[in-house]
Structures are given as C-alpha cells and as structure tokens.
Amino acid sequence: MNLRYLLQSIAQLLFPPSCPICGKSLLEIDSFVCLKCSTTIPFTHLWRVEDNVMKEKFCGLVPIERAAALFWFSSGSGWRDIIHDFKYNNHWYYAENIGRLLAKEFAESNFFDGIDLIIPVPLHWSRRLSRGYNQSEHLAAGISHVTGIPCNFRAISRNRNNPPQARRKFYQRWENISTLFTITHPEKLVGRHIVLIDDVFTSGATLISLAHTIHTACNGNVKISVATLAASRHMIDG
Ligand SMILES: [Zn+2]
C-alpha cells in the first residue's frame, strides 16, 4: 500500500461521506450515492440479452460466453464523472461500491452463474505505480464480495500501456494488441470459467486481446465472459 492510498483511506474515515454525483451529504438510508442520484443511472440492461451488441464485438475473434456493461458511458452524466474520479482522482473506493452494484443488478439474469474466477484487466506496472492502484481490481473486489467468486490478480501481466491506435492498419493493430498481455500462470485458468472485468468498453480491443491471449494459452480449454462498468453507446453502434 503506498502513502497516497493510505492517506485516502484515513481521509475517508475522518470526513463524512457525500454523494459523488450531486455532492450532498449522504444519509443513512443512502448507498454510496444518494437515493435521488441512484435513480439516474443509465442502465444498459445488456445482461438481460444473451446475444447482445457487446458480445457481437468478439464474434469471429474469440469465443465468449456472456458480455454486458452496467451503464452507458454518456456525456453529461454524473455516472460518467464517477468513472473519471475513481480512475484519475484517487477515488478508488467508489469502484468497489459500483462493483457491488453491478453484481446485484447482473444477478437478475444469473450472469455470474457457473463462473469460478474473476480477473480484472491488469495495468502495466508503471501505470499502476504512478496511479497507486488498479481501479479494475477494486471493481472486481466489489463483485467478488457479492457473488462469493474469488479474484485472481496475478495470473496475467500487461506488457505495455498503450492501446492500439485507430489509424493503424488492421494487421498492425492486431500485432500490437496480440502482444499486449502475458499469461504468467495459465495453469490457474485452464478448465475454468473466467469473467474479465474492466471499467469502460469502447472498441473492445483491449478485452478482445486479453480474451484471445487467455484462449490461446489454455489451448481453448477455458470459458470467458466479460463484464464492464460502462459501455460507449457510440462505439458499440459503430
Ligand atoms: Zn446525489
């Protein structure tokens, strides 16, 4: 645990919590957001649809069991700002709360049934060091708390920070993303049903790359699902 992380934890204990969306002090009946803001979440409801637009992004590239995002990543939404806050403004503790919310909502479609391992998308060590945490690990911890499914944070490592560039030609992009991750402990993944956790689904390139690398390392003897906090409606439509 680094110093910044520790100070944040102490500050959370000393100062009364407020709603991260509207800023009002939270009452006892509120969750991590106030009751009013909790009604404004732009749910995708993709977890209710088996063959949805998000799952289609993996089609022909890597087999996927299920894929869903909790809410749409839409501009002007306080829910979009929450992601920015826990990713860049040190508010990592929001992520675990939203992970719990995701798990409770997805439970209505038995999304997590049969899944036996939760793996957050790893950050490159240099980014993790500068940020002090990996927000997807906190999301995963929240999901694990509700579902009881264990997390694994060490089976996979990330080789680079940079995502593939949209302007590159397809084969250059694929070459770039196909070496983005290394499976350091494939024996922990073989024969399992894994759910990969990430914060935002845009083009899907990072998750497609990770799923493909896992599938190859396990010689196809693995089931993979994908759950993200948010999805860009524009990228999914496009
Ligand atoms: Zn509020």
Image (cartoon, rainbow, N blue to C red):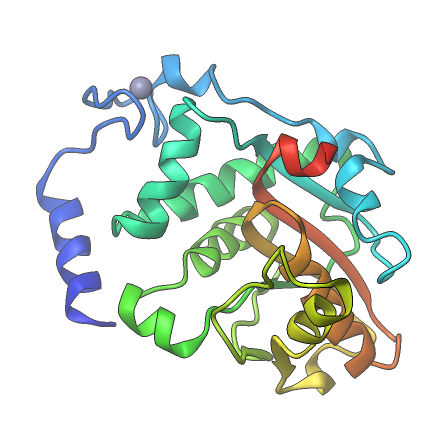
Q: Write the residue at 20% across / 19% down.
A: 24
Q: In this figure, what is the number of numbered marks?
A: 0
Image position of 25 (left or right of 61): left
> 198 or 48: which is nearer to us?
198
Q: Is residue 47 above or below residue 136?
A: above
Q: Write the residue at 46% across / 40% down.
A: 98
Q: Write the residue at 61% across / 77% down.
A: 181
Q: Quadrant of residue 7?
A: bottom left
Image quarter in which the C terminus is found: top right
Q: Write the residue at 85% across / 37% down.
A: 50
> 190 or 77: which is nearer to us?
77
Residue 126 location in percent, x, y?
36, 76
> 185 or 78: which is nearer to us?
78
Q: Is residue 38 above or below residue 229?
A: above
Image position of 83 (left or right of 65): left
Q: Is residue 102 above or below residue 175?
A: above
> 159 or 3: which is nearer to us?
159
Residue 223 location in percent, x, y?
82, 64
Residue 219 location in percent, x, y?
87, 81
